[in-house]
Amino acid sequence: MAKQKEGVDKRTARKMIRSTEGCAKSITFERNNKSDAVQLHDLPNDILGSILSRLTFRESSQMGLVSHTWRRLWRSCCRKLVFTGATMFQPGNRSIKHTRTNFAMRVNSFLRQLRTHPTLNKFVIKFGLRRKHTRHVNRWIRFCSVSRARHITINFTPGVKDFVMGPANSKYIFPLNVFSGPEGSSTHVRTLHLGYVCLDTTSSDFMIFANLKKLTLHKISFLGDLQCLMLPECNSLECLSISFCSLPGLSTCQPLQRLRCVRLHYCYLKKIELEAPNLTSFDLTNQPIPFVLGGPLKLMEANIKLLAKDSPYGDNLDYIYTELPAALSHVHKLSITSDLFIYDQLQGFSKTSARFINLRHLTMYLPLYGEPKSISGILRLAYLLELAPALEELELHVNGGGVDVGWALRRHMLPYSHNRLKRVLISGASVWDGLMELAYYILRSANRLENKPVPMGKQKEGVDKRTARKMIRSTEGCAKSITFERNNKSDDVQLHDLPNDILGSILSRLTFRESSQMGLVSHTWRSLWRSCCRKLVFTSATMFQPGNRSIKHTRTNFAMRVNSFLRQLRTHPTLNKFVIKFGLRRKHTRHVNRWIRFCSVSRARHITINFTPGVKDLFMGPANSKYIFPLNLFSGPEGSSTHVRTLHLGYVCLDTTSSDFMIFANLKKLTLHKISFLGDLQCLMLPECNSLECLSISFCSLPGLSTCQPLQRLRCVRLHYCYLKKIELEAPNLTSFDLTNQPIPFVLGGSLNVMEANIKLLAKDSPYGDNLDYIYTELPAALSHVHKLSITSGLFVYDQLQGFSKTSARFINLRHLTMYLPLYGEPKSISGILRLAYLLELAPALEELELHVNGGGVDVGWALRRNMLPYSHNRLKRVLISGATVWEGLMELAYYILRSANRLESMVLDPKIRIGGPQLDGWMIDIGRETIKNIFEGEEFQSIITILSLTDISILKGLKLRTHVLL
């Protein structure tokens, strides 16, 4: 930093200070008389806020004590409050006792400094407080609720021993009602951690946490006569952890679709009934009890720790062999910890027909008690091979016993043939006699148990080739030892000699057409293809051979080929994808109904029924010729809609009088294209799909669109050419909105997270009927929180069009605005274009502005009028105007922006037209560049303005503006 020369006004001296983001900002500051050095507080507030956010909670709080300026800045940047013994008391300072009273006084003093309620990301209280401190804690919880904290931790366990639950009459009663009051807010809460408090189970206030993702309860006491804890109706709940809470039971009042992880430790439960279809992890530490996990077909991992029984010889092996396979039949990885008693009188055990059908990895931790020389007690574990037919890895870890025993293998158990087991680990193998007997039994039973990988080599003469064991490397890169039979024709290994899992992996990597052709080679390949078929794609490319003109690509031939194909699939496989894309109509209903029924019974996840091929782009088609899609087939006794994740319908009819759309409970993406709706439709009500994330409707004549309940997971909405009259959506987490329609008022209830919106407004029928009034009044009211906005609309430029409507609504979060404006009218008109100057007032946080226009010519002359007073805008940094020389008013608008934007870094003026319409010749662009230079010659903005030539495409690519669409 160099000193200023004499005579230069230091008050307005402009200095370049590098921000934390690595880009230079031009700021104005005032020097004092004490020092010529730049002080820390001279930096812009956004940089200082970034510095504060990188400090710990204690350090940032100490910075707030430096001065009133720093305190005000700290209040505005405070996003997390962490009140613990480490943050409220100085480490090593013993002059102040770490008592509960002193802790409460310090927290109260801290919160009084925050006069307003900031929007918090984290609120933590972790100290050993009790019920007598209710007055203080209630005030803190109320502050947390009003501040809309996202992650809340109220943990009063410090000072409590590990396994002590504590008396309920001394614990603080957590006030759930605070979050449902007029000033409270629970919809922002994502994580709730409660420790050593009381909860009133007679209240239903837990249900207000609609967007809760993680709930942790530790050493909680429940008030009232609790028979069973009912989990709240939190559609967004993903993780549940309950530990050291005395609960008689746990259940759900409705299926929790997003629940992935459940952890229950030392709760002494009597029953568990959970409905979590997408559960992937289950962790339980409890005495043996029957439990039900309704429909968890995706359960990947489970950890079960069984506490000891009180009865003599009371191990849990009968429970492990009967109850666990029934409750965890689809688990892939299972860990069991349980005591096991070894006595000769313990030989029998209970059996059941239930199996671990998907179990691949089993780990058992078994503290053994009893007689080390007993064999029968340990050999009960041999039933594990029969219980898990798909088991590949087995680990047994035991303790107890000694090594002063002698073994003699009895070999008195017949082996059970197991074809999947590959690896076995037994730790503590020498401490019990029966472990060696068990190991020998496993060696005889596991046909594919692996040793060291051996490379493929030729067999020596005299070796029996019928039983020769060869190592064939699988597609996963690991060696497998398999037995195969050679024929007399060749010593080479044939493709069909490979294991079925490898062949299935090969088929899955082929296209649908190639895998279908492989099914025609032989009966063996056909049966294998039937079992591995996971996607059915019926299009013109898959049903007709490319280049073969002997068979006409007619609808009748297409239907015959699809019918013939489906007849080969005698059973209904579980499909991942089902696609029909061909120009079929209502007269083919008999065929299509059969295919849809097959799709429903096969539980397809991604369904596409698209009959648009052969239809022109903008043609919607008559309803009486379209196929009526049978939604009722998915709700019948054989159908299934809960597995459907994606549904794409094109050029079909839907019956709006039916409520069958509501059956798609797990639907994530819905696409409707050129759909006709039967019945007197006043407004399309979206289904109650709690999992719906993306909605796309195009070329469907709809009078209106609304939701019957808030769709919490809806992120993206796309509505194109539907000629809607009204839109009323309740989507609190909507992030993207795309609309192509005539100007209509629309409501996006509670959509505070909209990041991007694309609005294309169709033309009005009235003369001079552009949509500028609509853009200035309706869009700020509906999209006030949008960050990135693109608007496409025609604009009429006439001198009589000077006024426009104004409103108090603003784009309060808008950072990037792009406008595509086909202009019509008088090229010499100034007032019509200067109406766009109101954009600066409409978007106070705007940082990047793009204007792209067309029309007009370059045979006009400009003279800057300077007749508009500038509007001070402190955030705008970059501006791009393409087609800048085709209308006189554009230069007047550019000059207005230059005078208004105090922190403008660059303005790019591009004479070339970058959107559709008649393009300018090269000589016309050169004239436009010279005209712009003449207009701004001698002005004070020469360092900011960049004028592009015909070949300056590299400058556009280097800008941070969104110009890739134009290039």
Image: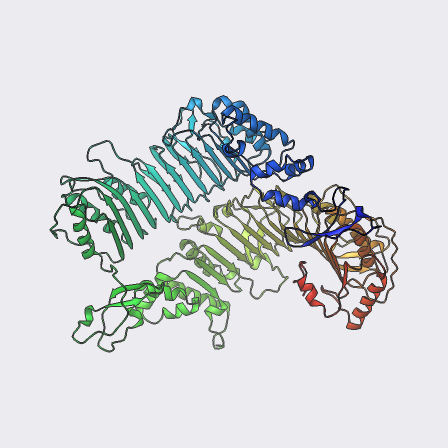
The image shows residue 52 at horizontal and vertical percentages of 61, 42
| Colour setting | rainbow
**Residue 915 versus residue 305 in the image, above or below:** below
Q: Is residue 627 left or right of residue 726?
A: left
- Asked if residue 728 shows in the view, the reply is no
The image shows residue 32 at horizontal and vertical percentages of 76, 42
Q: Residue furthest front?
A: 34
**Residue 724 versus residue 63 in the image, above or below:** below
Q: Nearer the viewer, residue 422 or 435?
A: 435
Q: Is residue 951 left or right of residue 672?
A: right
The image shows residue 40 at horizontal and vertical percentages of 68, 44
**Residue 878 versus residue 243 in the image, above or below:** below
- Position of the C terminus, as image quadrant, is bottom right
The image shows residue 461 at horizontal and vertical percentages of 18, 76
Q: Is residue 757 left or right of residue 647?
A: right
Q: Nearer the viewer, residue 654 or 834?
A: 834
- Asked if residue 958 shows in the view, the reply is yes
In the image, what residue occupies the spot 76% across and 44% down?
Answer: 31
Q: Nearer the viewer, residue 627 or 190?
A: 190
All told, the count of numbered labels is 0
Q: Toward which corner of the image does residue 256 lie, by quadrant?
A: top left
Q: Is residue 603 left or right of residue 712?
A: left
